[in-house]
Image: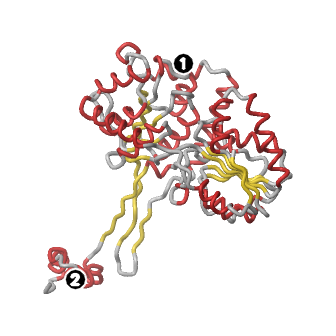
Amino acid sequence: MIRLSTLDPTFDRDFAALVDARRETDADVSRDVRTILASVREEGDAALAAFTKKFDGHDLDATGWRIEPAACGNAFDALDPVLRDALILAHDRIRAYHERQRPEDSAFTDAAGVRLGARWRPVDAAGIYVPGGRAAYPSSLLMNAVPARVAGVERLVVVTPTPKGEINPLVLAAAHLVGVDEIWRVGGAQAIAALAYGTRRIAPVDVVTGPGNAWVAEAKRQLYGVVGIDMVAGPSEIVVVADAKNDPDWIAADLLSQAEHDTTTQSILFTDDADFADAVATAVDRQIPDLTTAATARTAWDANGAIIVTDTLDAAMPLVNQLAAEHLQLAVDDPDALFAQVRHAGSVFLGRYTPEAIGDYVAGPNHVLPTGRRARFSSGLSVLDFMKRTSFLGLDEDSLKALGPATVALANAEGLPAHAASVALRLRLNH
């Protein structure tokens, strides 16, 4: 774990190294993914079967390529009532939040008499990747599938790896709750390729979303343009800004809530109190052994964790903006004062009683967020990722007379005489 203070003479250099730390895909992953994508494009289902046997250890022809809706319904009905209620609560809150994101069509007529506007429509089909390796995340299925449904997507396809042919029943229950149309037992880069290119069994989709490992993220990056994607997500990260009024155990748990995801996760604390920093560091070390994810959390914290002491919390905010973190917690009495200074963050959690974990499950805002400082230029998953906007315009004879001469002049200036003619002929101008 890195310990920094703005009073250190080398702070600027050390903090810049923290900001620029690379925790993402290497060249070998890129090469391997390219090979997998080419195989699926050329061999289709045969490649999917071969990769599934190699990576997931089962024969798709024996275990079944597709999980039927009845299995999802049975999984939902068999849930413990407390867990089923929790899943329903999460679904309903996520849907309510995302329904407020649905855009409205627009239309108006300007002073020149030109009718202008835009119309929003959903994509026809969306594919959602749901991890199924080290862990299974029904919450991720909800976070990806619900906004697609709110957008109006008609065909919703889930791909998920099923090691040894097994799948977490919670994932099936979540699929039932959303009303997923298809679930395929394929994962990895090969599943992304199947969604993008299509195979004999799996029809292609228009947009692919959902988290995955480095190979899945790289496949999405390489296939962008063949298919739309949500983002190229890297290792998770959290930044916590906290004063000494917090319970050190609370803040330590917040930092570990991300560290337990993966060994490449980054957890960073900013505080204006050196003694509190010490207390949090001690609490982290005390809590890790009690976690079932201790090995992962320990490695992540030791390799990528950081505690940074600043003169004031206001002084921390420019540094927070440089990190442009996926998750940002403001654990202070007046979080809005610090929130006003936030320029770059995927999602912000306001106050001492808003741990990031609430946002992962039931709060409502999406937990699919930009990582690796991409919050500088991108946003979390939303309904808009499953929709596209078509602009329209309509002129009559009078409005064409108003705009036509300028169009002809500009077209001629750009050396495009056919452009000029298409307007001038209607206006009977000498072009």
Q: Up-down: is 226 above or below 424?
A: above
Q: Up-down: is 424 above or below 27?
A: below
Horizontally, is 89 left or right of 72 in the view?
A: right
Q: Quadrant of the N terminus?
A: top right
| Label ID, residue 271 | none
On the image, the x and y values in percent for residue 295 come to 65, 29
Residue at 15% across, 74% down: 418
Disc 2 element: helix
The residue identified by callout 1 is: 74
On the image, the x and y values in percent for residue 111 come to 39, 81
- The residue lying furthest to the front in this view is 9
For label 1, count other residues whose C-alpha is less than 10 Å away and answer few (under 14), some (14-19) or many (20+).
Answer: some
On the image, the x and y values in percent for residue 408 come to 22, 81
For label 2, count other residues whose C-alpha is less than 10 Å away and answer few (under 14), some (14-19) or many (20+).
Answer: few
- The residue lying furthest to the top in this view is 62
Q: Earlier in the sequence, mark 2 or mark 1?
A: 1
The residue identified by callout 2 is: 413
On the image, the x and y values in percent for residue 257 come to 68, 39
Tell me whether the residue at label 2 lies in contact with that at label 1, contact meaning CB atoms closer than 8 angstroms: no
Horizontally, is 419 left or right of 337 in the view?
A: left
The CA distance from mark 2 to mark 1 is 67 Å
